[in-house]
Amino acid sequence: MILDVYVIGILFALAATMFFGITNIIYKKMSDDISVMDITFSRIWVSLPLAYIFAIASSDSLQIAIPSESMFPLAISMILGILLGDTMYFLSQERIGVSRAFPISMSYPLLVYLITAYFLEEPVIIQRVLGAIIVVMGVGLIARAEYKERSEDIGKWSPKDRTIGFALAFFTMVAWALSDSIFQFGLINVDPADANFYRILVASIILVPFFFLSFKGKRHLPNRRIIAFALMTGLVGIGLSLIAYSYAVKYIGATITAVMIASAPVLTAPLSALYLGEDVNKIVAFGTILTILGVILVIAII
């Protein structure tokens, strides 16, 4: 049986969602032992060899060719989404907590739809818009119920810092939306595996000076066990996730991919209950049902 390209794209998006969700749980478990910058360095650099191996395997050639007109949008999409967007999200999460940062940031699929409809002439389908809104609502319910931050964690930040946290969450939403939309444009004439390697290569080069600058002043490196754990997590969270994500955007577009990735809490809620001992209550269950319904509306266009 030969699967339809749309179905293959949905499967890739589902895989990216699973990788993304699982690694977020692990990073939360490690948050007290490793800094945001160390997470960024480890997950990008460990993923570069995997991205290259996958690119040459998919093309049967040691050379990777990226059209000149695609280089800039592919590079910008990586800088906006992974380097700026993810970093702003982690910083926002520290200041206002997951229950506030996550719903704001994960509203980005709606902005992706608006951008791709206007600039890439993606058809506006009411059922899909409604589905995206329902997903955002469901994810918001799950995040609010699942992550109840301790007052002392949030209280250590001043009102000004918390305002910055909300601003960072908003700019994360904008950065992720622009990243996904620009990436879809950059992929038009490029193989997804080649594009993925090029994007990670760009990020790896950009991070080099920041890595050396990070040693100025007081610098506490994580222990070897945490570093090894971070590298393995990064291999899945960026290495495998971005490969699946690249193919998903190529086959089904940025909007559907964004909606599915935003629905990651549906998968992480039960895992959080098992791995982190978090409570899965009726609100989480209701949010899960809403999110699943929204995803169905988005991907099953009648």
Image (cartoon, rainbow, N blue to C red):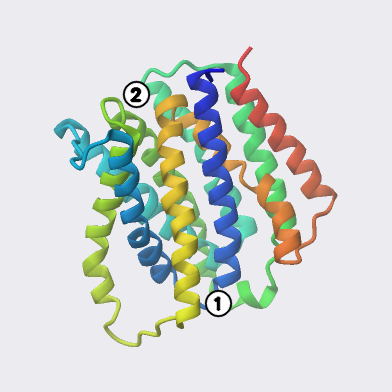
In which quadrant of the rendered view does residue 192 lie?
A: top left
Q: Residue at x 45, y 28 (%)?
A: 114
Q: Amino acid at mark 2?
A: Phe
Mark 1 Cα shell of 10 Å, populated few (<14), some (14-19), many (≥20): few
Name the residue rendered at 28%, 34% in the picture.
Answer: 59
Residue nearest the observer in this picture, 141 or 267: 267
Secondary element under disc 2, as helix, strand or loop, is helix
Q: Pointer 2: residues within 10 angstroms few (<14), some, or many (20+)?
A: few
Mark number, residue 266: none
Residue found at the very far right of the displayed protein: 282
Above or below for 226 versus 17:
below
> Alpha carbon of mark 2 to alpha carbon of mark 1: how far?
42 Å
**Residue 286 at x, y percent in the picture:** 80, 42
Q: Position of residue 148 (x, y in %)?
A: 71, 64
Where 85 falls versus 256 (above or below)?
Answer: below
Looking at the picture, how far across and down is residue 284, in whole percent?
A: 77, 49
Q: Closer to the camera, 132 or 54?
A: 54
Q: Which residue is mark 2?
A: 119
| Residue 217 in the image, given as x and y percentages of width and height | 30, 86
Query: Which circle marks residue 32 in the picture?
Result: 1
Please tell me whether mark 2 or mark 1 is closer to you in this view: 1
Split into 4 quadrants, where in the image is the C terminus?
top right
